[in-house]
Image (cartoon, grey):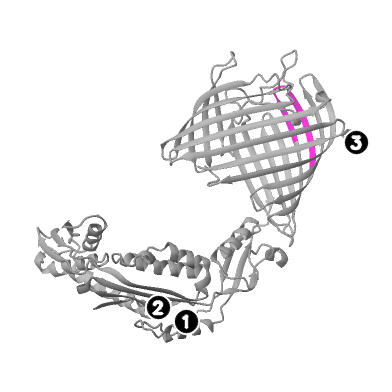
Amino acid sequence: MMLFLTLNNQRAISSLKRMAGGVGALSACALWPLHAQALEAHVHGVDGVVRNNVVAYLTPLKIPSESRPELYSNSVHTDVVNALKAYGYYTPTIGVTFRDRQHVDVHIDKGPRTHVNVLDVRIVGEAKDDPEVKKLLADSALMKDQGKPLSHEHYEYLKKQLDTLALSRGYFDASYPLHRIEVRPWEQRADIYLVYVSGKRYRYGDVSVQGSQIRRSSIDALQPFKKGDPYQTSDIAEFNNRLGRTNWFRSVSVRPQLDQQQGDEDQVTRPSNDDSTVASAQQNAAEQHAVAPVSVHLIAADRDQFKTGIGYSTDDGPHAQFGWTRPWMNERGDSLTNSLYFSQPRQSLAGQYRIPLEHPLDDAYEFNYGFDYIDDNDTRSRNLWFTPTRAWHFANGWDQRLYVRFSQENFTQASDSANVFLVTPGVSWNRTAVDNEQFPMHGNRQDLTLEGTTKQFGSDISFMRAVATTRWIESIGDNNRFFLRGNIGATQTDSFSKMPPSLRFFTGGDSSVRGYSYETLAPRDGDDDLLGGKNMLTGTFEYQRRLSGAWWGATFYDVGNAFNSWSDQSLKRSAGVGIRWISPVGPIRFDLAHPFDDDRSSWRVHFAIGPEF
């Protein structure tokens, strides 16, 4: 009878590894000169995974030039025997013939295959009723091996899975008091015994926080667990992620503090009807403290952060940006963000003061403010605005904002001129779900805004307005990518001549209907000057194909326009080709588009930097 034992004593394993490493290094120096080459095995009689395993065992063998190959026949024979045992062949007939020092022929008659006769796998302790452990066993290939050929791979893989699951779900005192495979080659029979004692599942203890400049209640609100909850690695990762997403800290480290003391040695015993060893191991595990305190180490983010950037797009031409951020203003975690944008047709200053509430990442007050100046096409506008907002982030990924925008806009749009004050309540929803923020292969973004005002609110005009945008990216394989975009907007007002340009619809440009200049598709007056429209509708279908590495080719079709009546849409169409480069600073898009409804231009170049979302 052959008996295979798996050691579980970590100290013994470490010692053996050190000894083996040292002996292996000396042997390599003494027996394998630098000019020795790896052995190439020509294996006959087996195929598939069995042949591959034999080759894998023999490849590391090297025969020095001063040695006779025949002296290594026993080594080759032993390696082949071990390679075959892994798949249940314990009585093979093996022939070894060397062609030279680098080539050997191995002829194998596998003989009968050993089958699993006894399969005794038991879970003892709290893990016995754990649904994740039950699922792991139900899906395990080993649990289906009763009466089938012996596979050491199935046995070792289940043990590895149990070890991984134990660490992720807090069974830190788990052990194998009984784990072995008994093989009787003359009977082609193998008996497998595997007893896994999980002990008690650890539960969260106290959470200690060091280095935080933010009040403790805000840190506690980010915890995805409570004291006494069962431990899960995913909770620790999520806590770490949430702390990082606040932008309050330059460094975040969340770690469980576990008792490192272990028992002297785990027992390896023979199976018997008496489970006293198993019961003893279970009792010892149950007496462990089984509490995992959590330590949080934080380093505050820099108080002031600055960024600058320059760019170019066919919509705005050359432009520059400057940003100043204070990720935390006080122990409550308030933040301040300001940005400046400069281009020839438009300049803007925008900022936000954010006050986190009970759930810092999901609930906040936001005070947005800014000034926009536009001098482009037939638009001249100065717009000063302030928008208090109540913001929520929901578990399903949607963001909701309730706001009131106070704005003063002095404008000239073609023949329309006015200085309009508005108090505009509104609500918006948006959600972005992508697999990669820089260049997603699958994802979508949804946006919907509903807003309006009346003179009873103190506004100079009354209107209702709705805007919706949908964008989708899907891929087939790694080299075919599809991008779809749709935009729709509608306005109801009796005072359109006083509607500010910021609330009118214009289409055309890099992110709308390519082939036409930026925001040049809209109703015009008698002098052919742009007035803008009450309504808007655009759509895009784009197919992209990887050319090589980070380079993609694209073909697209755009359609859309801005208009005043849904019965007279006069949609414009365009199509073209493009190049996409996934650069270190973000995707760069270069398009050549042909407008089908404009006799004045046959082709137009579009250039932009940034993802489609």
Type of amino acid under label 2: Gln
The percent coordinates of residue 58 (x first, y second) are 21, 62
Circle 1 is placed at which residue position? Answer: 262
> Distance between the Cα atoms at labels 3 and 1?
75 Å
Whether residue 373 appears in magenta in the rendering, the answer is yes
Label of residue 227 in the image: none
Pick whichever, 548 or 277, lies toward us: 277
Work out whether 269 lies above or below 591. below
Work out whether 564 lies above or below 101. above
Type of amino acid under label 1: Gln
Highlighted magenta segment, given as a residue range:
372-386
Element type where label 3 sits in the image: helix
The percent coordinates of residue 204 (x first, y second) are 60, 72
Which image quarter is the C terminus in? top right
Tell me if I can see residue 533 in this picture.
Answer: yes
Residue 535, quarter of picture: top right
Circle 2 is placed at which residue position? Answer: 10
Pick whichever, 346 or 61, lies toward us: 61
Whether residue 135 appears in magenta in the rendering, the answer is no
Q: Main secondary structure of the magenta part?
A: strand
Q: Residues within 10 Å of mark 2 (few under 14, many from 20)?
A: few
Residue under the image location 77 percent in, 45 percent down: 402
Tell me if I can see residue 499 in this picture.
Answer: no
Task: Tell me if 71 is positioned left or right of 222 in this view.
Answer: left
User: Are the residues tagged 3 and 1 within 8 Å (C-beta)?
Assistant: no
Residue under the image location 59 percent in, 71 percent down: 230
User: Are the residues tagged 2 and 1 within 8 Å (C-beta)?
Assistant: yes
Circle 3 is placed at which residue position? Answer: 456
Q: Earlier in the sequence, mark 3 or mark 2?
A: 2
Q: Earlier in the sequence, mark 3 or mark 1?
A: 1
